[in-house]
Image (cartoon, rainbow, N blue to C red):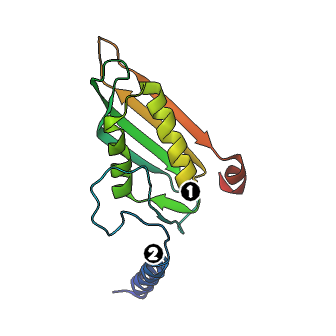
Amino acid sequence: MTGDAQKAEGEVNQRLNELEELLKTVPDVKHLGKVSNEPSYHLDTVPWLGAPDLMVEFECKDFTSLCPVTGQPDFAEVEIEYKPYKSLVETKSLKLFLTNFRDVRCFNELIADTIAEMFFIQVEPHWVNVEVHFHHRGGIAVNAQARRVSKKRMEIGS
């Protein structure tokens, strides 16, 4: 291994050790590293110390909620894209968060808005964009998009 490669490996190992120590201090973690299968509106987060230009995108291909009128299931794909500020979302808690909507009677557009609002409040990103693509019912597909932006955090580093 060359000197540069050894130096890079040493820096990566140091970074991993720092992150491991930091994860020990994460408060209010309900799902990370624990057995939990029940839906929850709580999103676990972990500290983000990386580059300020990271953007994260999640895709959930099997989202369901209930039609507020008929109670029939509405099937959708959900895309969540965000720019972290001080924390990242832990994916298991996100899965349980989205599963929570399975028994919720709600209009499609409000689902997108609710996910964006709850995500924005709990994760506190620079911005979050939520797109929900509901499958056709009665010949019509509904696509809804909700966005939240922190003007204060955007000034720090958009």
- Which of the 4 image quadrants contains residue 147? top right
Res 23 label: 2
Tell me the crowding category of disc 2: few under 14, some 14 to 19, or many 20 or more residues within 10 angstroms, Cα based.
few
- Which of the 4 image quadrants contains residue 71? top left
Instruction: Give percent across and percent down for residue 120.
Output: 55, 47
Instruction: Give percent across and percent down for residue 95.
Output: 33, 50
Asked if 69 appears above or below 103 in the picture, the reply is above
- Which of the 4 image quadrants contains residue 135? top left
Indicate the amino acid at tag 2: Leu
Indicate the amino acid at tag 1: Asp
| Pointer 1 residue | 53
Residue at the spot x=37%, y=34% of the render? 104
Residue at the spot x=42%, y=88% of the render? 3
Instruction: Give percent across and percent down for residue 145.
Output: 49, 30
In this image, 130 relative to 96: left or right? Answer: right
Say which element carries label 1.
loop
- The residue nearer to you, when weighing 76 against 110, is 110
Q: CA distance from mark 1 to mark 2?
A: 22 Å
In this image, 120 relative to 95: left or right? Answer: right
In this image, 7 relative to 100: left or right? Answer: right
Residue at the spot x=68%, y=50% of the render? 154
Q: Are marks 1 and 2 in contact (CB under 8 Å)?
A: no
